[in-house]
Image (spheres, coloured by chain):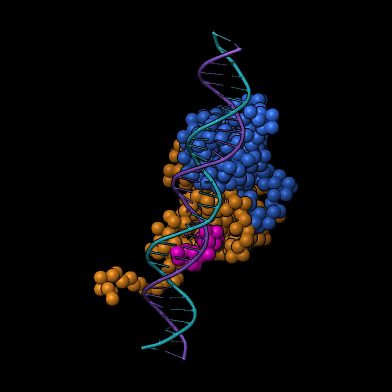
Chain colours: A orange, B blue, C purple, D cyan
Amino acid sequence: MGTTTEERRSWTQDPEGVKRDILSVAVSEFAANGFSGARVDTIASRTRTSKRMIYYYFGDKHGLYTRALEAAYLKVREGEASLDLDHLPPAKALARLVAFTFEHHRENPDFIRMVMIENIHNAKNLAASQVIRDLNVAAIDKLADICRRGEAEGLFRPGLDPVALHWQISAASFFNVSNRPSFSAIFGPELYDEKAQVCLRDQTVEAILAIVATSTGK
Amino acid sequence: MGTTTEERRSWTQDPEGVKRDILSVAVSEFAANGFSGARVDTIASRTRTSKRMIYYYFGDKHGLYTRALEAAYLKVREGEASLDLDHLPPAKALARLVAFTFEHHRENPDFIRMVMIENIHNAKNLAASQVIRDLNVAAIDKLADICRRGEAEGLFRPGLDPVALHWQISAASFFNVSNRPSFSAIFGPELYDEKAQVCLRDQTVEAILAIVATSTGK
DNA sequence: ACGGAAATGAACCACGCAGTACATTTTGGC
DNA sequence: GCCAAAATGTACTGCGTGGTTCATTTCCGT
């Protein structure tokens, strides 16, 4: 009855595709607006599916946020995996790692913003995710290895703390992206010209090399 | 009629006090929860006055946020004014400035968080505030002066960019506070022990001194 | 001492937005 | 082919929250 005049809706199912779609939109929305700033309706409207599916797959806004955070981490750590430093001498390897980190952060502003947002929330969700903790601990192994080799060859000062070194590297690389808006607003955009960025990167590399070479701190 | 049984309310006016009260609560609430995360009702409940007064004096939530941001900046820049470096030789002065900045940021987490939040919002409000721009440009004068003196005495390499140097100093000092939650969550809280913090601070001072001393970058 | 403006109180409202109910279609196992 | 389970569409709701209305009290100039 009336089937001819009424519209018949049909679709083909694609659970994994739908989840991926939602997550990628969620990452960019949360990264852009923060947790409370992001709107589930907006996220939904930017996917090829509906709000209904978000709640179907992710439970609630918070669940979606957590999964988006993990997705951002996974993507960025994937990019790091390609870096092979074992064949380089320690100083070269370290220089390369620092320069790479600097560039890699620049290329992943959404990831940086997700971490900023997490820090505003005191890293509550980050701390709760075993997935992320594992990823990060793995990320420091490369650095620890370089330190070990450098010390063994007598090139680096003894007693280096890989975590402290990672802190120094992250500080510059992260800050460069995270505080770009405020820095540009106050001092002008010149420091973010490609040329100036290369300069900052090289300066950072040199600073890190200086730290491992000299005997500083106690 | 009935004036004896009905409660009579009376109060003494204090416009400036009320504004100060509201602003100080607003800073801590916005710093803690971000713009959309903060609740006007919560802010109101923590003041000695009412939500009505917030709208009376600040117009809307956004107006309150802007004023809170400026208040945070004013307070922190005030603390910096006490630092007198003119009587120190350039290297000493720079070392002192870096160490001071590092500590000063640690002591003002709410300010750091306000800047983080601004950066999430692409520094939109910060850019719109002439007050804040003036404050920051003034803040770099100290550093520019040290650079000038250092170069004149042949102690620093020529062509130093005070803004780039400020970037390096800020990166470490800011990151140390801004990313403490995520860093602690992932690598443990050890790096934020007093002892380790002193170590990081000294390491940062040395790194900055290395930058001005060597001829790095182009 | 009084009149108008500034300052404050108490209740109220409109609506944006997270989350749901219910119906319908697809899919895969037997 | 049939049926239960998974996946999707459509429409709806309750309430948290930013903002307002109206009345009342304090203060200050003359």
Image height of B189 relative to B147, above or below: below
Magenta stretch? A52-70
Residue A20 seen: no
Question: Does the stretch in magenta take in A53?
Answer: yes
In percent of width and height, residue B212 lies at 58, 38
Secondary structure character of the magenta stretch overall: helix
Q: Nearer the viewer, residue B61 or A218?
A: B61
In percent of width and height, residue B78 lies at 62, 29
In percent of width and height, residue C11 lies at 57, 40
**Residue shown at 55% from the left, 59% from the top:** A62
**Quadrant containing the N terminus of chain A in the rendered view:** bottom left
Question: Does the stretch in magenta take in A41?
Answer: no
Q: Nearer the viewer, residue B66 or A197?
A: B66
| Residue A107 horizontal side relative to residue B43, left or right | left
In percent of width and height, residue B189 lies at 69, 54
**Residue shown at 67% from the left, 32% from the top:** B6
**Residue shown at 43% from the left, 67% from the top:** A18
**Residue shown at 62% from the left, 61% from the top:** A128
| Residue B63 horizontal side relative to residue B97, left or right | left
Residue A86 seen: yes
Q: Nearer the viewer, residue A44 or B45?
A: B45
In the picture as drawn, the residue positioned furthest to the front comes out as B1
Q: How many marks?
A: 0
User: Within the image, what quadrant is residue B96 found in?
Assistant: top right
